[in-house]
Amino acid sequence: HLTGKTALVTGSTSGIGLGIAKALAGAGANIVLNGFGDAGEIEAIRAALASENGVEARYFGADMTKPDEIAAMVGGVEKEFGAIDVLVNNAGVQHVAPIDEFPIDKWNLIIALNLSAAFHAIRVALPAMRKKGWGRIISTASAHALVASPYKVAYVAAKHGIAGITKTVALEVAQQGITVNAICPGYVWTPLVEKQIPDTAKARGISEEEVKKNVLLAAQPTKEFVTVEEVAGLALFLTTDAAKNITGALQSIDGGWTAE
Ligand code: NAD
């Protein structure tokens, strides 16, 4: 259903963003990848997305903490494809520390990347989207857009901020064929999470299975990770016509975390 449309997914060289890019390409969208990583690996991902799905795929290495690089990327995509039809604000990082020890540079980074980048990307991508009278803006927020955990002050503040951007912009474009939503995953099985498990098991003298259930998934009633494919499936659904009345919503996919 996305044939002829173009999707920009920020932070799509890995994890959830890559999963969303694959799902959107599978539905026929041209894909613009963004994010950091090894140039050869990124080119392999780009080439595979294009050839396996019969779509155009491009890569823009914009640093999403830099408003001028975001504007240049959006301008570049519009020059080639006309407009961004599906904008996925996904790039993000985490830092864990008590507030009185929280490094100021980490606060600034997380607010810039996990919050302000969405403002800057939406701000510049919206006019062309509006001209076409159709658009989907999706942000990867988190269960931490709805509830807090200690020692994650910047992340929780940024993700709650994404909830505010989502609701505000949804109201501004409600009659223009554009929906604006946030996805709120619990713990998602990404390479980043997976790599921590053997070391945590060793450090605590417990099995890898116990690390998953009792350490990482302490907050998640299902005691199961959400998968990248499940998050991507939800993002894909939000781009369909069936979802055209879902807007300004914070869609949980968290194994029951925020029900408690
Ligand atoms: P990841 O580390 O696998 O992916 C992060 C992506 O962001 C990578 O492509 C990375 O290159 C990119 N990135 C980092 N800094 C950047 C910058 N300055 N400019 C552009 N790109 C940059 O992590 P993930 O788990 O896939 O996380 C993706 C999003 O999902 C984040 O916003 C995260 O907060 C959110 N999220 C993750 C989980 C989880 O459990 N993994 C849960 C809820 C929400």
Image (tube, rainbow, N blue to C red):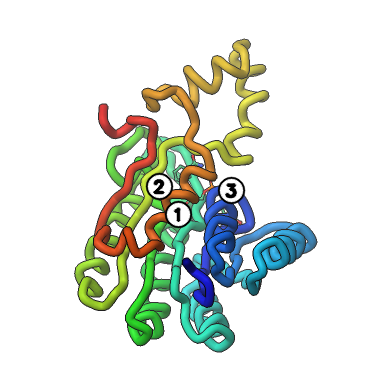
Going from N to C along the chain, the mark reached first, 2 or 3, is: 3
Mark 1 and mark 2: span between their CA atoms? 6 Å
Q: Residues within 10 Å of mark 2 (few under 14, many from 20)?
A: many
* Residue 149 to residue 240: above or below: above
Report x, y in % for residue 170: 25, 66
Q: Residues within 10 Å of mark 3 (few under 14, many from 20)?
A: some
The answer to the question of whether label 3 and label 1 lie on touching residues, with beta carbons closer than 8 A, is: no
Give the label on residue 119, or none. none
The residue at label 2 has a CB less than 8 Å from ligand 1:
yes
The answer to the question of whether label 1 and label 2 lie on touching residues, with beta carbons closer than 8 A, is: yes
Splitting the image into 4 quarters, where does residue 133 fall?
Answer: bottom left
Splitting the image into 4 quarters, where does residue 151 fall?
Answer: top left
Q: Is residue 144 left or right of residue 80?
A: left
Say if residue 188 shows up in the picture.
yes
Q: Toward the viewer: 259 or 39?
A: 259
Give the label on residue 110, or none. 1
Q: Residue furthest top?
A: 205
Label 2 belongs to which residue?
155
Mark 2 and mark 3: span between their CA atoms? 18 Å
Label 3 belongs to which residue?
15
